[in-house]
Amino acid sequence: MAGDYAVPMLSPTKLLIIGGAEDRVGKAKILKRFVKLAGGKASTIVIIPTASSFQAEVIASYSEVFTRHGCKTLDVINPADRIAADDPALANRINAATGVFMSGGNQLKLAQVFAGTAAGEAIRRAHQRGAVIGGTSAGASIMSEFMISLGDEGVTPRQRSTQLSQGLALLEGVIVDQHFAQRQRYGRLMSIVASSPNLIGIGIDEDTAIEVTDNESFTVIGRGAAYVLDCRRAITDAPEARSGAPLLVSGAVVHSLPAGSTFDLAKLVLTEFVEQHPDSGITVTVAASSRP
């Protein structure tokens, strides 16, 4: 039972959502940040390699980088199917974690194993009590309530070009996509948010992450950018467009947010931009927007 473990209480709640292909062998800035958020030397990190086709390599790689940056207690949870993911003993191991990290790979497999199981619910509870939940690539997509499990790549949004699956709903009201610029996924994310304008799309480049605080705002870190797609007031022909046709989307708002950007998820506005100049050591801060 959960009571068998001394469950640490942390605050505020944090998600570290990574666009994939993050640095693991150099300074590993993003993964170093994950360990710090999990408690540094006092952290207990659970690695979930389930989505990957190369699980032994994934476990070895993340174990090395997390240990290198101070974590002393690591566990690996890797259920083969939904029955295994419903094991209470497995959920209890997640209850003891201060950080949970989900690797990349096949996001449909990740969703089928974890969504709605005891292990999946344990991840949700871990987030609610303040453990940092991190994920890269497939592990990033499953953070949202609904996730893109399959979809065509390309710049042009097209009707019925994507497939959605249930995610873990750690971040509600958004849909996350990854490898965003590198694999030209603008079109598939725009097609989803144009058809479901109540959802906000967040696309994240490789070796880039958004650090989400209390599900209210996020700050971008890493080498690329994050993109926010807002179709709440856009005009679209999604209800009438034929399958595969390019979608009309007019009036969408797109935010391109490089590292140092802090974005309000409720008001959907930039609140701060802190630009670093490594060569000169100069830091430039841009004041927040005051738009409602």
Image (cartoon, rainbow, N blue to C red):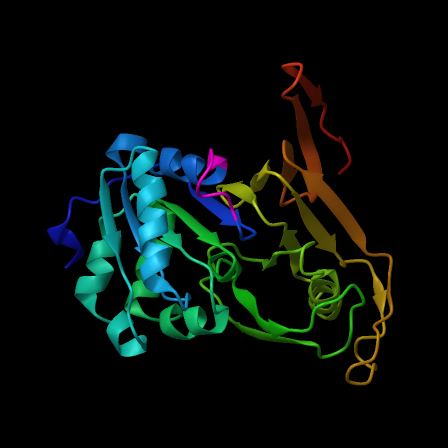
Task: Specify whether 108 is left or right of 132.
Answer: right
Residue 107 percent coordinates (x, y):
49, 68
In this view, the residue in front, 187 or 122, is 187
Query: What residue is at 36 percent from the left and 41 percent from the top?
Result: 65
Residue 262 percent coordinates (x, y):
63, 35
Instruction: Considering the whole magenta stretch, tell me its main secondary structure.
Output: loop
Quarter that holds the N terminus: bottom left
Query: What residue is at 23 percent from the left and 52 percent from the top?
Result: 75
In this view, the residue in front, 280 or 211, is 280
Residue 12 visible to an observer of this rendering: no
Placement of 101 over or under 148, stated as above or below: above
Q: What stretch is highlighted in magenta?
A: 22-29
Residue 259 percent coordinates (x, y):
63, 35
Quarter that holds the C terminus: top right
Query: What residue is at 71 percent from the left and 28 percent from the top?
Result: 288
Query: What residue is at 48 percent from the left and 66 percent from the top?
Result: 167
Q: Does the magenta stretch include residue 159?
A: no
Residue 5 visible to an observer of this rendering: yes
Placement of 47 over or under 216, stated as above or below: below
Q: Give the tally of numbered discs.
A: 0
Task: Specify whether 197 is left or right of 146.
Answer: right
Task: Specify whether 46 is left or right of 184.
Answer: left
Quadrant for residue 284, please give it: top right
Q: Does the magenta stretch include residue 27?
A: yes
In this view, the residue in front, 155 or 4, is 155
Quadrant for residue 256, please give it: top right
Residue 235 percent coordinates (x, y):
86, 65
Placement of 247 over or under 62, stated as above or below: below
